[in-house]
Image (cartoon, rainbow, N blue to C red):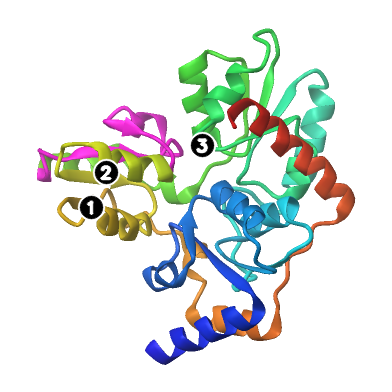
Amino acid sequence: MKNLVQEIEKLKKERRAVILAHVYQPPEIQAIADYTGDSFGLSQQAAATNAEVIVFCGVHFMAETAAILSPEKTILLPALDAGCLMFDDMIEQALKKKIQEKPDAVVVSYVNTPAAVKAMSDICCTSANAVAVVESIARDKEIIFVPDRNLASYVQEQTNANIFSWPSCCPTHARLSKEELQAMKEKHPQALVLMHPECEPEVRGLADFIGSTTNIVKEAKRSPNHEFIIATEQGVLYQLEKACPEKSFYLASDKMVCSNMKKTTLEKVKSSLIQLEPRIIVPEETRLRAVGSLKKMLAICG
């Protein structure tokens, strides 16, 4: 593996490339990344760098978001088949139909959506700023929140907004049951539960802290506690253990593994740098509409 990593480093310099890795990626992928983080933060990093080539180790919608913000750069997705089970190929048509049914509603799309959905949206949000985005919308407006019903319900609990939530969710987070988490709390009674808002509502009731992956890492670093139960995808443990080696972290359930996030390999990263493929390109008309929704979010949340 050492030789493979050295080859990647050499190719990266030759291509004037940077490697971005989502925190749900395998440890060996996070280890070679120039930047790690959540999906939108990485896309912002892609836009800020002077690199000509961005190797995005994540899933398809993440690379699309990088392409939306950095159309002049070559955006590579080493694992082209890495999709997202939160939505299917029919989401664009389904959203068009829902907008026709509710023409006066405001469409808020999670950044965890395809470019075409962002392009149909009034504004985007992340798991970290979803509450602030919804609070910026007039109280008398109905909101179509797409695509995660659990994030929508979390936002609704915090804001009392009139939200139509999409009948879909992240299966990785939805796998965690209240019974499993309760058992983990009994096994580790001193541990605090740090949870992603994509978990089911009844499970969220057992959390000590709810936040995005980035904020989960920040909370673990900030907290004086030394034990934590982590209720999000398994890959974040790499960052937590790296940031807080003196603390103990327990995954809430061994079911919380996203198969799509594990499709990236070192061999695929190397191949993408050699071939400059698979390349992600967003059609310009779609890109311009989508970037408008992202800019509206940034105007509110920075």
**Where in the figure is residue 255, as x and y percent of width and height?**
34, 56
Q: Mark 3 — residue?
A: 127
- Mark 3: few/some/many CA within 10 Å (<14, 14-19, 20+): many
The residue pinned by badge 1 equals 244
Q: CA distance from mark 2 to mark 3?
A: 19 Å
Q: Earlier in the sequence, mark 1 or mark 2?
A: 2
> How many labels were placed on the picture?
3
Q: Marks 3 and 1: CB-CB under 8 Å? A: no
Q: Is residue 211 magenta?
A: yes
Amino acid identity at mark 2 = Lys
Q: Choose top left, top right, bottom left or bottom right for residue 278.
A: bottom right
Which kind of residue does numbered mark 1 sit on? Answer: Cys
First to last magenta residue range: 187-212
In the picture, which quadrant includes the N terminus? Answer: bottom left
Q: Is residue 255 left or right of residue 60?
A: left
Name which of mark 2 and mark 3 comes first in the sequence. Answer: 3
The answer to whether residue 291 of the structure is visible from this angle is: yes
Secondary-structure class at tag 2? helix
Which residue lies at the image location 62% right of the left edge and 59% below the top edge? 49
In this rendering, the label closer to the viewer, 3 or 1:
1
The quadrant in which the C terminus is found is top right
Q: Nearer the viewer, residue 236 or 202?
A: 236
Does the residue at mark 1 contact the one at mark 2 (Cβ under 8 Å)? yes
User: What residue would you read off at disc 2?
Assistant: 221
Q: Nearer the viewer, residue 44 or 175?
A: 44
**Relative to 53, is 3 above or below?**
below
How far, Cα to Cα, is label 1 from label 2?
6 Å
Any magenta on residue 36?
A: no
Q: Residues within 10 Å of mark 2 (few under 14, many from 20)?
A: some
Q: Residue at x 63, y 25 (%)?
A: 300
